[in-house]
Image (cartoon, rainbow, N blue to C red):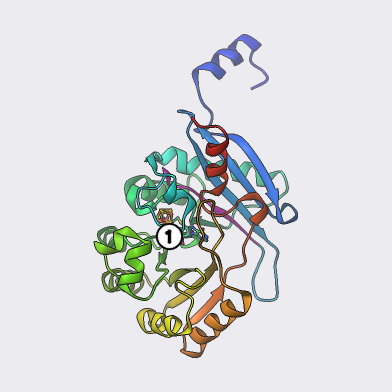
Amino acid sequence: MRTLPPAARQALDQAFAYSSVASHRRREADGGMTIKHLFKLQDARTIETVVMRYEASSRSRERTTICVSSQVGCPIGCSFCATGQSGFDRNLSEAEIVDQFLHARRELAAIDRTLTNVVFMGMGEPLNNYHAVVAAIRRWARPDTLNFSPRRVTISTIGLVPFIERLASEELPVNLAISLHAPDDDLRGSMIPVNKKYPIAAVVAAARAHADRTGRRTSYEYVLLEGVNDSLAQARQLARVVRHPRSHVNLIPMNPIEGSSMAPPTRARIRAFATTLQEAGISTTVRATRGLDIDAACGQLRARELAASPA
Ligand code: SAH
Ligand code: SF4
């Protein structure tokens, strides 16, 4: 607003916040194709947001995906996750979720790119902040704002069954990703405490009901941990658990986190695990790891920042 006198501009600046998220740190990796933001919120807490660009290939069109956070920290406490290990502070507001998108969108406009996909795979458990997450998705979708279709949005959840059921009853055709990570309840319960409340059979049944109701695909996320959940017998068991016409398995080699001895398997083992699933008739991909040199796995940049400068 350069037409206003400087004093008025200063007064406006002090009285209003243009965005609820402010850039605190910004790092690039993969030759600029991955950008990791550490955003500062108005109460000085920090969250991470990652923007990943993909060029067009023979199989897919050009894409730009934003990975947004839904909470500051996470109350679920998974053993392999930097966010889970850092504890829980608070839910994000609808505005703080919406503004992660708007910030990235403004930055991309300068290089003539636009956001094509949103994944709730940053910090936090989105279904533990249900109202703000659904409100943000509805706001992006409004024809008078961004007109960004829920079909381009994926909610990743650890499997909070009542909220998966509730999501299925909304008129909201979002994609669901279920963080499964183990084919049996004993192992899953040792990695993911909430599995005791919502065991695998209940989570898979809710995911299937969501897929049947919305017609959307369910992807099962599976972080591969060497010597823990990467045997070929476990791959065969996983195939039995997830079998459904619209199921897909996404294998994620573990991104090592500080203070944990867990590690990803060798590439040969990852390939063998993927092949075993495919031979059992399960559509499977291995996720390319992005931004390792900028701590781009969930919660890692913030964990490092907190360790360097305790609040
Ligand atoms: N709370 C939600 C969404 C955020 S986590 C969920 O758990 O689904 C997003 C994804 O990152 C999940 O699939 C999670 O399992 C995965 N993840 C967490 N820590 C990881 C690590 N160290 N390496 C690789 N993936 C990790
Ligand atoms: Fe929370 Fe997801 Fe991390 Fe588990 S994996 S602690 S649910 S963010």
Residue designated by label 1: 156
Please report the residue visible at 60 percent of the width from the left and 43 percent of the height from the top.
37
Q: What predominant SS class does the magenta segment belong to?
A: strand
Secondary structure category for the residue under label 1: strand
Residue 139 in the figure: left or right of residue 22: left
Residue 25 in the figure: left or right of residue 254: right
**Residue 8: x %, y % from top left:** 59, 12
Please report the residue visible at 56 percent of the width from the left and 83 percent of the height from the top.
272
Residue 148 on the magenta span: no
Please report the residue visible at 41 percent of the width from the left and 40 percent of the height from the top.
92
* Vertical placement of residue 133 versus 41, above or below: below
Label 1 within 8 A of ligand 1 by Cβ: yes
Q: Is residue 17 visible?
A: yes
**Residue 135: x %, y % from top left:** 37, 46
Residue 256 in the figure: left or right of residue 28: left
What segment is highlighted magenta in the picture?
A: 63-72
Please report the residue visible at 56 percent of the width from the left and 19 percent of the height from the top.
13
User: In the image, what residue type sits under mark 1?
Assistant: Ser
* Vertical placement of residue 69 versus 78, above or below: above
| Frontmost residue, 124 versus 309 | 309
| Residue furthest right in the image | 31
Residue 211 picture quarter: bottom left
| Residue furthest top in the image | 7
* Vertical placement of residue 310 versus 291, above or below: above
The 10 Å Cα crowd at callout 1, few under 14, some 14 to 19, many 20 or more, is: many
| Frontmost residue, 244 versus 274 | 274
